[in-house]
């Protein structure tokens, strides 16, 4: 039985929520910032801490939000077309 990364207690099948490659209690999978309960697949993460999407945008949206990767891909596309 896997242990919850948040409270370190065993997670029973009926209360499990898989996220970030780990098995959490549904009740332990909460936004690190606002404590809102999260659903697997409907949140973002930063350094293995889960955040709801609004909090992620608010806390990390401006800087490291993969904007660089997107711009790089667009540039190489242009480059290949030439
Ligand atoms: Zn837990
Ligand atoms: Zn939040």
Image (cartoon, rainbow, N blue to C red):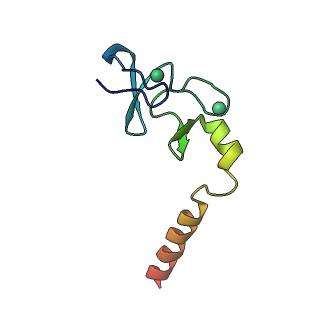
Q: Is residue 4 left or right of residue 71?
A: left
Q: Look at the image and tell me in which quarter the N terminus lies.
A: top left
Q: Residue at x 37, y 26 (%)?
A: 3
* Residue at position x 50%, y 18% in the image: 27
**Quick one: 72 or 21, which is closer to the camera?**
21
Q: Give above or below for 64 relative to 21.
A: below
> Furthest-bottom residue in view?
82
Count of picture labels: 0
Give x and y (percent) for residue 72.
53, 71
Q: Is residue 82 above or below residue 13?
A: below
Single out the residue that lies furthest toward the top: 14
Of residues 72 and 11, the one drawn nearer to the viewer in this rendering: 11
What is the quadrant of residue 2 in the picture? Answer: top left
Q: Position of residue 34 (x, y in %)?
A: 67, 29
The image quadrant where one finds ligand 2 is: top right
Query: Residue sitting at 66 percent across and 44 percent down?
Result: 57
Residue 32 falls in image quadrant: top right
- Residue drawn at x 60%, y 34% as measured from the top left: 52
Residue 35 is situated, as x and y percent measured from the top left of the image, at 63, 25
Q: Quick check: 65 above or below 32? A: below
Outermost residue, front side: 8
Q: Quadrant of residue 55?
A: top right
Q: In this orientation, which residue lies closer to the viewer: 61 or 22?
A: 22
């Amino acid at each position: 039985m896997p242990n919850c990364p948040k409270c370190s207690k065993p997670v029973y099948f009926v209360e499990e929520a898989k996220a970030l490659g780990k098995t959490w209690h549904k009740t332990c999978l909460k936004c690190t910032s606002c404590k809102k309960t999260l659903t697997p697949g409907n949140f973002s993460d930063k350094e293995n801490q889960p955040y709801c999407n609004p909090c992620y945008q608010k806390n990390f949206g401006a800087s490291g939000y993969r904007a660089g990767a997107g711009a790089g891909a667009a540039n190489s596309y242009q480059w290949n077309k030439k």
